[in-house]
Image (cartoon, helix red, strand yellow):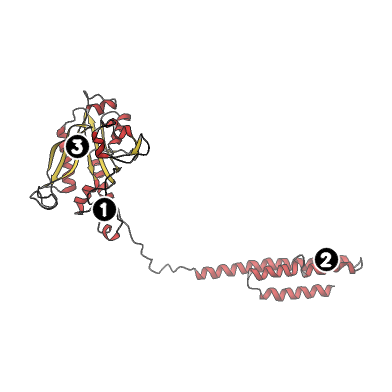
Amino acid sequence: MKEKLAEIKKAFIERAAAAESEETVEALRVEFLGKKGLITGVMKLMGQLSPEERPAFGQSANEVRNYIDSKIAEKKKEIKALELEKALEKETVDVTMPATKVPEGSLHPLNKVTEEMKRLFIGMGYEIAEGPEVEYDYYNFEALNLPEGHPARDTQDTFYITDKMLLRTQTSSVQIHVMEHKKPPIRIISPGKVYRADNLDATHSPIFHQLEGLVVDKGVTMGDLKGTLEVYAKAMFGENTKIRLRPHHFPFTEPSAEVDVTCWGCGGTGCRICKGEGWVEVLGCGMVHPDVLRRCDIDPEVYSGFAFGIGIERTALARYGVSDLRQFFENDVRFLEQF
């Protein structure tokens, strides 16, 4: 019997020396130590021995079993170390090699213009205010003097979520939120995305961006509004730019005006951009209507204010000499990388 154990041990040593993978070592473990393995088979023969021989044989069998078990563990550890070494050699990175250049992106031209406008107004003491894009009808229309059935709503036909909620048509709704929770003095801008049911063409889009401004304080006049817009026009369109205010009607301002700037293409002499007029319309503005102030619990006998709304796309068209705003949204890298 002892000779049998010696043969098994010798066979294991020879087989283990040739094993080169964890799978091969595991197969050896099953072959020698498994339920149907060689050691188990020999142990079953103990019944043929005399009672005096059994203890010594059992001890020898356990010694061989423990030897094989420890060698299998060592072999597995050795193979894992070799595999790790090979993997590290294969995956070694040469840190002296030039790195692969990652293309750098940049701000979208509309974001660039927005950031310029933010910096301009922040420099004049304005704060940035934000509001929801899905807005209540009250904040988008009613609080701005546009009650249900008002004809001016037709020009802003938009996307309704429910009877009382819609995608905002203007960031003017943010002004109401601010005036409800903050008392004068107020000086804020509210840039953001707005929605209207417009057909997409070279100058219109159902989704576009606005920057609304609001100032409310004691003694605010139309002259303050004009001076603010002159600073904006010169910063965005050039130092020689002039502005012109034309009377207009907005339900939430009184008096109201459309603002033109001297054409950036011809300087006011007339060209295809301004259609020979020398002026290009860029925004709407006016003094905040007293009823709007009253709805926000601000006394129009004590306070006055002005508001303006600037189309960011329209400003970008002028800044970059682009004739079709659809190009800003088509994600053509050849177009966008020019900016």
For the N terminus, which image quadrant? bottom right
**Mark 3 or mark 1, which is nearer the start of the sequence?**
3
> Residue 58's spot in the image, x, y percent?
84, 66
| Closer to viewer: mark 2 or mark 1 | 1
Of residues 274 and 220, the one nearer the viewer is 274
> Residue 112's spot in the image, x, y percent?
26, 50
Quarter location, residue 74: bottom right
Three-letter amino acid code at the position of disc 2: Gln
Which residue is tagged 1? 326
- The residue that appears at 19% across and 47% down in the rendered structure is 236
| Closer to viewer: mark 1 or mark 3 | 1
Image-based side of 190 in relation to 282, left or right? right
Which residue is tagged 3? 285
- The residue that appears at 26% across and 53% down in the rendered structure is 326
> Residue 272's spot in the image, x, y percent?
12, 53
User: Total label count?
Assistant: 3
| Closer to viewer: mark 3 or mark 2 | 3
* Secondary structure type for disc 2: helix
Q: Are marks 2 and 1 in contact (CB under 8 Å)?
A: no
Which residue is tagged 2? 59
* Secondary structure type for disc 3: strand
Three-letter amino acid code at the position of disc 3: Cys
